[in-house]
Image (tube, helix red, strand yellow):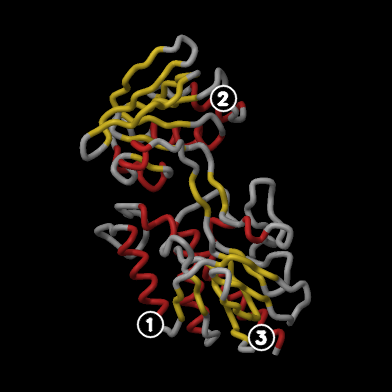
Amino acid sequence: MEIIECLIIGSGPAGYTAAIYASRANLNPVLIQGLQPGGQLTTTNDVENYPGYPEGVTGPIMMEDFKKQAERFGSKIVFGTVTEVILSKTKGDVHKIIVDNKEEIYTKTVIISTGASAKYLGLESEKKFMGSGVSACAVCDGFFFKNQDVVVVGGGDSAAEEATYLAKLCKKVYLLVRKDEMRASQIMQKRVFDTNNLEVLFNHETIEVMGDKTVNSIKVKDTKNNQEKIISASGFFLAIGHTPNTQIFKNQLDMDSVGYLITKPDSSITNLPGVFASGDAQDSIYRQAITAAGSGCMAALDAERYLSELD
């Protein structure tokens, strides 16, 4: 059987960056793109905070640039989905990866860059305006709503953080909390209530995101008195959490209670030899393209060192 040096699972900024570095180290990496080639960034219209694009760039074009750069150095990019992994616990042994339930790949190292998926409410109108007023990342898209009114949905620390961040940029921020209290920590709640242009609406649920080509209002329901109302807003931010795409590694790799892969401090090294994690699959804090790319670089360097030790 053919055994490759390095297999990369996932094709966002982390995966493609890992491929660039692994290629340049002559590891001849194979990258499996997954269900969404390019990752979450392919759903982002404008990226203006990534260095090297002074005029900004669309997410799909940026990911295509990453892909071309990886291919330029010899990375093999394969369309497909990893459906099963059998990871070895012994240093030097190969790992077995199954793609689309049929193709078997044997590899000395695995770099996991499967990302995380933002949780959404499941509304049709939410999907309709994705990238046109609907966002799951205030840090990524908040700038586009400067001096405008926006709505944030969520009641935890993430929602509190996103809402207070947006309050520094936006004219007015409405925070919709489904229950009669927030789940956020006391210090985060204090920040929310101390922010003048941030209004918390308890017992409120979203019924519909409204607009023409872009969002212009949100229809909500006050569940306490069963009344509906419309909030004028040009932005609708989801802050109800993310789900790391790591289910396939359960019972083999160490992960936290949510499913984020656990790596050794200051590295991409997991609990199994020759297996490395990068990007949003192991980062529950920053979740930015730039940090994902950086961790993809780390994973490739860690994989190279691991292989050198085997030699």
Measured in 3D between alpha carbons, the distance from the residue under mark 3 to the one under mark 2, in whole angstroms, is 50 Å
Identify whether 1 is placed above or below 8.
below
Residue 198 picture quarter: top left
Q: Which amino acid type is shown beneath numbered disc 2? A: Met
Residue 41 is situated, as x and y percent measured from the top left of the image, at: 39, 56
Residue 213 is situated, as x and y percent measured from the top left of the image, at: 21, 40
Residue highlighted by disc 3 = 308
**Residue 110 at least partly seen:** yes
Q: Earlier in the sequence, mark 3 or mark 2?
A: 2
Q: Which amino acid type is shown beneath numbered disc 3? A: Ser
Of residues 269 and 55, which is closer to you in this image? 269
Mark 1: secondary structure? helix
Residue highlighted by disc 1 = 72
Q: Earlier in the sequence, mark 3 or mark 1?
A: 1
Of residues 271 and 225, which is closer to you in this image? 225
> Are the residues at dot 2 and dot 1 in contact (C-beta closer than 8 Å)?
no
Identify whether 103 is placed above or below 121.
below
> On residue 182, which mark appears?
2
The 10 Å Cα crowd at callout 3, few under 14, some 14 to 19, many 20 or more, is few
Q: Residue at x 37, y 57 (%)?
A: 42
As drawn, the residue found furthest toward the right would be 90
